[in-house]
Image (spheres, helix red, strand yellow):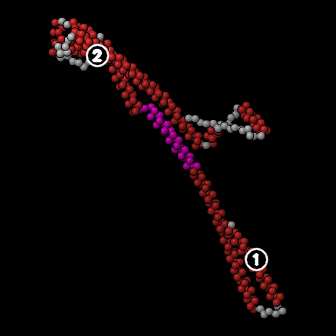
């Protein structure tokens, strides 16, 4: 598992004095044995990241140990496969030698002019059957009649062709033994390989290690999930408090605005009453030189009050838009 280190680089674009100052600080930091490791700093400030990394380290340790053991098993299996390959080469060479001897025996029969269906060749085949029955791992079986007939042939004595052919056949014995022993070795290695693979499938160390590693990561994930849930709860509580505060402020603003609207309505009512008073006063007045100044003064006072009411209404309208 590779964990990258964060490094900090001071570029050439900095002013000379600042670059010299940073260079001096860098040398001072190096001489004091201090260094900045971004990943380590992040792990210290992020407990969730630290927990994940710790779980991964434990998991990799278990898998690494199991891998070392499994690698030994793989090497053993490879060695056995190589041994089988060599044994098959031995079999191939031995069978080739036997085939060459059989070709020489066939040439010998041609040289003596012995027919394949002749009694001499039939007797030779019976003697050869006895030879084959005596070889390692042979499945050739001699009956009682075969044994009695062979004894009679030997008692009468073999012909020159039969004697020479049997001598040549006897040269096959070491090759036939090599073929048999190599076959036994191949069978034994194959059985061992199959048994190892069966055990690996049933109870492999790597699978156990993988299971342990997964268990560690699952446990770490659950713990991390708990940490995330706690963090989320804190965040939700914090957001709820902020929302409640915003709702309170909104309510206060709405109440304040309603007060201003009520005040405007009250002033509108006053304006209507003043307007009615002006109209009534104008209707009731008998305009004469003596009272015209008083009428003008009353109207002016009423208009000033109307102007004040209009200003208050404008201010309320501005507040409502804001």
Numbered label attached to residue 1: none
Q: Quadrant of the C terminus?
A: bottom right
Vertical comparison of 198 with 149: above or below: below
- The answer to whether residue 72 shows anywhere in this view is yes
Numbered label attached to residue 308: 1
The residue lying toward the viewer, choosing from 2 and 29, is 2
How far apart are the alpha carbons under marks 2 and 1?
132 Å
Q: Is residue 195 left or right of residue 305?
A: left
Give the image location of residue 278, x and y in percent: 74, 86
Q: Pointer 2 and pointer 1: residues touching (CB < 8 Å)?
A: no
Give the image location of residue 191, x and y in percent: 35, 25
Which class describes the residues within 10 Å of circle 1: few (<14), some (14-19), or many (20+)? Answer: few
Q: Quadrant of residue 7?
A: top right
**Residue at x 61%, y 43% (from the top left corner):** 46
Q: Quadrant of residue 18?
A: top right
Kindly state the secondary structure of the residue where label 2 is placed.
loop
Q: Quadrant of residue 258?
A: bottom right
Give the residue at mark 2. Answer: 136
Which residues make up the magenta segment? 203-231
């Amino acid at each position: 598992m590779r964990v990258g280190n964060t490094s900090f680089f001071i570029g050439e674009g900095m002013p000379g004095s600042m670059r010299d100052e940073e260079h001096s600080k860098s040398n001072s930091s190096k001489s004091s044995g201090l260094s900045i490791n971004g990943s380590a700093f992040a792990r210290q400030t992020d407990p969730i990241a630290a927990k994940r990394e710790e779980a991964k380290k434990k998991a990799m340790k278990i898998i690494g140990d199991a891998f070392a053991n499994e690698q030994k098993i793989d090497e053993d299996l490879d060695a056995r496969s190589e041994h089988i390959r060599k044994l098959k080469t031995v079999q191939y060479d031995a069978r080739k030698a036997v085939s060459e001897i059989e070709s020489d025996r066939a040439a010998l029969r041609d040289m003596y002019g012995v027919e394949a269906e002749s009694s001499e060749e039939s007797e030779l085949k019976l003697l050869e059957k006895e030879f084959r029955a005596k070889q390692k791992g042979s499945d050739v079986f001699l009956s009682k009649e075969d044994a009695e007939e062979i004894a009679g042939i030997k008692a009468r004595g073999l012909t020159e062709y039969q004697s020479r052919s049997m001598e040549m056949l006897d040269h096959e014995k070491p090759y036939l033994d090599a073929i048999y022993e190599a076959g036994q070795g191949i069978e034994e290695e194959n059985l061992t390989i199959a048994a190892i693979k069966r055990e690996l499938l049933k109870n492999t160390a790597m699978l156990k290690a993988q299971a342990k590693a997964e268990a560690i990561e699952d446990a770490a994930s659950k713990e991390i999930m708990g940490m995330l849930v706690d963090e989320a709860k804190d965040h939700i509580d914090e957001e709820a408090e902020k929302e409640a505060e915003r709702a309170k402020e909104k309510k206060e603003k709405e109440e304040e605005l309603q007060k201003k609207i009520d005040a405007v309505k009250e002033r509108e009512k006053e304006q209507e009453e003043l307007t009615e008073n002006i109209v009534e006063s104008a209707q009731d007045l008998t305009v004469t030189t003596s009272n015209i100044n008083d009428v003008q003064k009353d109207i002016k006072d009423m208009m000033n009050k109307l102007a004040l009411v209009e200003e208050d209404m404008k201010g309320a309208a501005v507040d409502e838009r804001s």
